[in-house]
Amino acid sequence: GPKVLQIPSHQIIDMGQMVTLNCDPVSNHLYFYWYKQILGQQMEFLVNFYNGKVMEKSKLFKDQFSVERPDGSYFTLKIQPTALEDSAVYFCASSLEQNTGQLYFGEGSKLTVL
Amino acid sequence: GDSVTQTEGQVTVSESKSLIINCTYSATSIGYPNLFWYVRYPGEGLQLLLKVITAGQKGSSRGFEATYNKEATSFHLQKASVQESDSAVYYCALSEWAGGYKVVFGSGTRLLVSP
């Protein structure tokens, strides 16, 4: 089936550094999402993105977070600067239509902030 | 806000026995949400198992079934006879319009099928 690819699968960085998580969504999809899952906790919505704009974001989407998809390339999540509480697995998802809620997920990028 | 509550933690079932993973939801929209079960097999990404968008309807896939019960606000996942290959983490989820479609997930239930 359709695949969403995420790079890197795991990254370890020092607190205060910047990190960019990359997502290659399904090729004809139009809606993009990031979710965050802390170990042992629920997977929680961060943000959704369509037509170059953030449509909706949650309280977890702090000012240090930003998303973009320049020229149809990777859909990225940037955190600058990182904090210890940003350690989590970040899942990217994409969908073709908005009104079904059916998402295709990547395998996740595990971020460890030291 | 919207929320999904499902059977917590891990469920262990012997092969060929029946399974039920409970899921209830709370949705704030005037209408009613779309409901999903997603599954993550070991070493793979989260993938859709089944979905139901109409109250009263049943969805099925790979021997699993779930019925959208609007009165009870439930969407329990059932299978009559599980196999070892069903061992995975199962997530109940809902989506509804909230200024944009957002999918809200439950905490996940790990199913371990023992031989």
Image (cartoon, coloured by chain):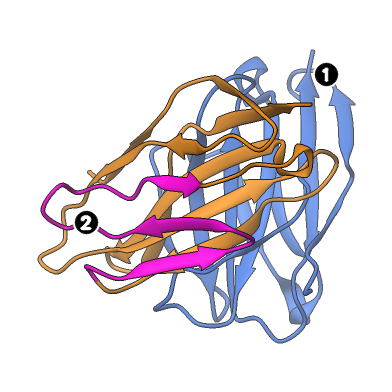
Looking at the image, residue A25 sits to the left or right of residue A36; the answer is: right
Q: Position of residue B101 (x, y in %)?
A: 38, 67
Q: Quadrant of the C terminus of chain B?
A: top right
Label 2 belongs to which residue?
B69
Q: Is residue A39 above or below residue B102?
A: above
Residues in magenta, as a range: B55-79
Q: Can you tell which mark lies on residue A14?
A: 1
Residue A64 lies in quadrant: top right
Residue A1 lies in quadrant: bottom right
Residue A92 lies in quadrant: bottom right
Q: Chain of mark 2?
A: B
User: According to the colouring, which chain is blue?
Assistant: A
Q: Position of residue A96 (x, y in %)?
A: 58, 82
Colour given to chain B in the rendered image: orange
- The question of residue B72 being in magenta is answered with yes
- The question of residue A42 being in magenta is answered with no
Quick check: can you spot residue B26? yes
C-alpha distance separating marks 1 and 2: 48 Å
Looking at the image, residue A95 sits to the left or right of residue A105; the answer is: left
Q: Position of residue B52 (x, y in %)?
A: 38, 68
Q: Chain of mark 1?
A: A
| B47 and A66: which is toward the camera | B47
Check disc 2 and report its element: helix, strand or loop: loop
Q: Which residue type carries mark 2? A: Asn
Residue, x 22% and y 68% (percent of image)?
B55
Categorize mark 2 by other alpha carbons within 10 Å: few (<14), some (14-19), many (20+): some
